[in-house]
Image (cartoon, coloured by chain):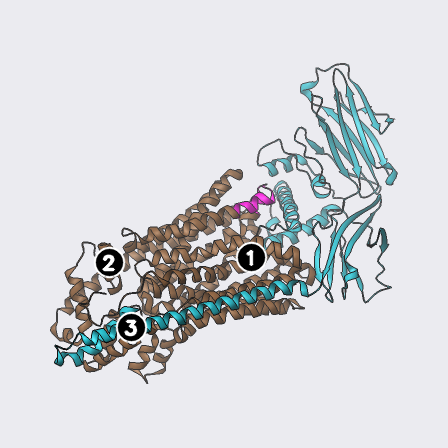
Amino acid sequence: PPPASVGRVPGPPDGGWGWVVVFGAFISIGFAYAFPKGVAIFFKEIQDFFGTSYSEIAWVSSIMLATTYGAGPISSILVNRYGSRPVVILGGLLCGIGMVSAAFCTSILQLYICVGFITGFGLALNLQPSVIIIGKYFLKRRPIANGLAMAGSPVMLCTLAPLNQFLFDNFGWRGSFLILGAILLNCCVAGALFRPIGAATAPVKTQAIEEGKDALKEEVTKDAMEMSSPMNITMETKTEEEGGKGCCEKVNQYLDFSLFKHRGFLIYLIGNVLMFLGFFAPIVFLAPYAKHIGIDEYSAAFLLSILAIVDMIARPTTGIIANSKWVRPRIQYFFSFSIAFNGACHLLCPLASGYTGLVVYSIFFGLAFGMVCAMLFETLMDLVGAARFTSAVGLVTIAECCTILLGPPIGGTLIDTFGDYKYMFIKCGAVMVLAGTFLFIMNYYNYRMLAKEEKERRAKEEDPKSVRTENEGRNNWNKETAQDGPELEPLREEREGLKKEVNGT
Amino acid sequence: MPAAFSGKRPGRLLRRLLLRLLLLLYLSLSLSGGSPADPTMTTQDASQSQAYSLTKMQAGLNESSPEPVTTTRTVNWQTQGSPSDHLTLGRNVSTPGPDLTTQEFKQATKENMSNVTFVEYEVLLPGVSGTSVEKNITLDRAARIELSCRLDNKYSHLKSLQVTWKRGNETIRHMNKTENSWSIQLRILDNSNLGGYSCTLKGEEEISAMFHLQVPKIEGKEKPIVSYEGDTAVMICKSFGYTPIAWTWYMTNGSEQIAINDSLLADKYVINRLSANVTHLKILKLTKEDDGVYWCEAAFELGKSKGKLKLRVLSLMVPLKPFLAIVAEVVILVTIVFVYEMYSKKKEKSAEDEKEFDQVEQLPNCPSKSEESNGLENSSARHRKT
């Protein structure tokens, strides 16, 4: 940080230990997304063993997925209080305990609890903090970091699938669960790598608080602190200065419900909840559809491998593209485009005839899927800022939880009723194109509103009364007005600072 | 399901029926095969409900249905227009025989005559010799069948053909069904009537086709079932499409096969017949001696057929070793990470202290400012380090 802005908090490292954190997040996120799918290999055997029907077994996977997404807010609250590292280590331990106890289960109900709830909860405690800590370590290169970390999911899936098969052939399902429990403990290693980054700036915060107390209003100080230290505010700071407000404020400290008034957050929430209705169903039904039109089992399974490989490459690539100076300011448009592209693929799938057509579809689907996933959390961070991202991600995941679980069963019902897979593809495609269009239009509106607000804020800044209260803020503003770039689109302080740096590089 | 059928014409109804049936066949094959590289099955209620509907329909179709089953429709559905495919009901379900790509296999009308079914099987012969044509026919109960060999019309220029039907070395009298087809009628009443029947056309070249009549095959499991001492093992045998009269389980003792009597050893073996086509063998309180090969035998009217299953019994120590190894690896890695962090923090702090010392020394000229800005600059130095 330049010496002129004395006392200004430095931006996130954007490198160094950050890349180690990305690696840890890669592992953590990989397990969280790939494990529920990988465990499906054991279902046939477990179904025979307990003598249950297939849908009863499929509940295990559904419960795991539901818990992973539904426990998002709890995860957010814990991260808000304790930071990412302890939560991920706890998550890893829970996963391990869950799977090890599942190895000794004697009924399907116990499996629901051990594999479904406990392991699912552990995975939830893995997923959110990993995503959150990337936001703390990166700003300039955040899309790349996000893309790389999210690439963990297909890589882990490709590794877990044959590994699970190998374990199953050699140890049966009980032994495999035991060993998988140990493997999941590796999430603790990933968690150990998540060095907390907020702690070093604690003295700066107290410094700012002192300055704020010298100033006239506490609210103004709060704004100053948000502007000057965008990356490092936690809810604890608020407790220090606000102390003893109403219970609403207290709840907001743990989980920021005021996000529901945030325009960008609401847009993201509605668009994503809609999108997830059609997101996972095509993957679930791709292999059955292939077999339905006459392709043999192994080639059908190979389609999924193609999808995973393309996905693996697409995610970091999308991260790099999203980080470029042309796309980063307009990343929301890129995100909406990739959702609509995904939907278009599904709409065109029924036209694919024969194996070659399906291979082409898999490639494009893998590409689109990777693009969407890589930017899933990046766009949320972009909209709400890293400070409130912790709570935002928790609220978003619990809302998505419902539609994620509904998507494949609705697709299945469509297939059953019409006896044809094409209606499922049409439904998924239509839903996603709709979601993409909605996001595109609403984000255009959002960008314009943000530009307007920014102009108003600048006009207010000319007022001498507010200038005196924040030394640091003034430094920031001077810098910004001095380096007013030709593009005016992104208009929160964070993004302006970022744009400066991007333009400069 | 019923809603889909109401109010539709019988032709459409039939097509839908066949559509579902074939979907079911593929699904049942895939479900039984258990594709290992298909990990993304999160909620497959659709396929499961389809599997259920299929078993129901299959059961329904196994009884002699009054509706004639026409294969042309089946072929069209299966290949989406391409006429060279050959999928039929009977063949695919029970006999994984060689693919017929050079001729069509048609199953014609099925009539009820007293309680013996009468089925006609026809093979279309290619005009060229050298290609051996074989067809597997699965029969589970006594039947009257007619086997016919037909020469395609485009080869009708071939004159002076001598047609022989044989079973092994024994010649069977045949009849000319039409100008270009020859057939024999057989009564299959017991095991001795099964086997291979061939028709040979001798002209300039010799063209022949072979029909293999056999009982339904039972598939066991190729991969061994792994279980642990003291645990329970469940072994399942299924018969696809044909209902056996009885199931028997055998265990292998050395080279002998001993029948398992579950009433005698009721606390060790439990045999359940879950449905007409499925049998379960549950072995309780496993020990090392239970390790080995097991056979499930299905008895049909015309004979018996066996499926092979392997059981492996492991002790709990076997998976425990990799488990402990991985846990040890995790503990070591976590320790390394934490130790490295403490070490690098110590290094930072000592370097910081040195720098602060330097900074303080640099500010002797501004006594008035130093008290205010000291704190600021100290903190800036501190966070510059991080």
Residue A117 visible here: no
Q: Which chain carries label 1?
A: A
Q: For the point 24% across and 76% down, which residue is it?
A: B357
x, y percentage for residue B32?
Answer: 67, 50
Query: Which residue was labeled with disc 2?
Result: A501
Q: Which residue is drawn at the image coordinates 80% and 32% (left, top)?
A: B146
Q: Answer above or below: position of A305 versus A204.
A: above
The amino acid marked with disc number 2 is: Glu
Q: Which of marks 1 and 2 is nearer the N terminus?
A: 1
Question: For the residues marked 1 and 3, what is the alpha-carbon distance in whole angstroms?
Answer: 48 Å
Of badges 3 and 2, nearer the viewer stands 3
Residue A221 visible in the displayed image: yes
Q: Name the residue under label 3.
A: B352
Quarter residue B109 falls in: top right
As rendered, which of B98 and A240 lies closer to the eye?
A: A240
> Position of B347 compared to B376: left or right?
right
For image coordinates 31% across by 84% down, the residue present is A243
The colour one sees for chain B in the rendered image is: cyan
Location of mark 1 (residue)? A38
What is the letter of the brown chain? A
Does the magenta segment cover residue A295?
Answer: yes
In this view, B371 is above or below B224: below
User: Residue type at mark 3?
Assistant: Glu
